[in-house]
Amino acid sequence: MPNILTSYKDLLDKDIIQFDENQNATVQSLSKLFHSETNLLTKIKKLIFKERVSKGIYLWGNAGSGKTMIMDICYDSLKTNRKKRIHFQEFMIDVHDSLHLIRNNKTDKPLIKVAEIISKEIDYLFFDEFQVNDIADASILARLFNLLFNSNVFIFSTSNIIPNNLYKDGLQRDRFIPFIKLIEKDCINIELSTKKDYRKKRLKNINNYFSSLNDKTEKEIEKIFFDLTRGANLEKKSIIVKGREITVSKHAKGCARFNFDDLCGKAYGSEDYINIAKSFDIIFIENIPKLSPEKKNEVKRFIMLIDALYDNSKITVISAAGEPEDIYQKGDLEFEYKRCVSRLHEMRSKEYVESYKN
């Protein structure tokens, strides 16, 4: 199994990534930390003295800076099966499901029980895209993480957000402050402060709007997704909006793939699309058909979707059965759709892509 420095150098040698001074410094630091975490002395301290050199790592910085790549290198370097990599929102859904089940069984102290179940199976827990939007999560995170730390579960998180700004302006945020203090005290906080956005660089020369649906377009879309995600394994994710669950079956490294019917063929509203936009950096919308006047609901949702993506300055990669103005030509929403057409054209422009900052 490769170590962290070897894996990073291999990516450089294969020209998959370009050398970045800040990335390199972060990798060097993490290599030392993980060597310390996994050496014999640390294991003896853990087993006999219940002592750990550090309880976790919180790696934060701008999207596209390479956080997920670095986390994956660290994950792959661990020579143990007692590790788990999971999207943070997926993890919290599992936690709440377990809490619900335990409470139904009338078991005392359900959160302690959940932490015990996790720590029996896992020594290393890796979270990608750590962010907190839900008060149900915010209210239990400090206790949950404290229980996991006390059970010697090492937690590695990546986030676009500095710890002190997590759950900013959230409902009853005072209940979340103990978690921020816990992360600042017990985790090694590392900022990956590169000014380069490597995902943006890969976006520079791509075509992000395809006006025909055929095998050639499908292959082009596959290639773009592969290039942007560096061939990472696809993951599933659930987005919770006021108790509603939106399932994202294909995403990796900040990029999400959707079929048109998945987004606009279901009873989603503006709030759902806003939450989707805030959850990813690049959204693929595939197989957009020409929409007849009878498809009023689908047209309305498509307009709301594009508004949400545009207002949040997201990059889109689209395959459709025509140019934006050809998708919907007649019907009750012609006037509203004109704004959508204008935005779709702007979102495929070089200027829009180059202004991408997320």
Image: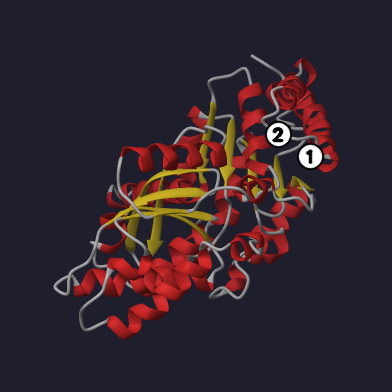
Three-letter residue code for mark 1: Gln
Three-letter residue code for mark 2: Ile
Res 130 visible:
yes
Total number of numbered labels?
Answer: 2
The residue positioned 32% from the left and 38% from the top of the image is 215
Verify CB contact (< 8 Å) between mark 2 and mark 1: yes
Rendering quarter of residue 246: bottom left
Q: Quadrant of the C terminus?
A: bottom right
- Give percent across and percent down for residue 18: 75, 35
Relative horizontal placement of residue 61, taking residue 199 as reference (left or right): right
Marker disc for residue 265:
none
Residue assigned mark 1: 23
Which of discs 2 and 1 lies nearer the camera? The answer is 2
Rendering quarter of residue 72: top right
Relative horizontal placement of residue 205, taking residue 186 as reference (left or right): left
Looking at the rendered structure, the secondary structure element under dot 2 is: loop
Compute the Cα span from label 2 to label 1.
Answer: 11 Å
Residue assigned mark 2: 17
- Give percent across and percent down for residue 318: 41, 55
Report crowding for label 1: few under 14, some 14 to 19, many 20 or more residues within 10 A (C-alpha): many
Relative horizontal placement of residue 262, taking residue 98 as reference (left or right): left
Relative horizontal placement of residue 46, taking residue 174 as reference (left or right): right
N-term mark: 2 or 1: 2
Q: Is residue 51 above or below residue 136?
A: above
Res 235 visible:
no
- Give percent across and percent down for residue 76: 61, 24
The residue positioned 44% from the left and 47% from the top of the image is 90
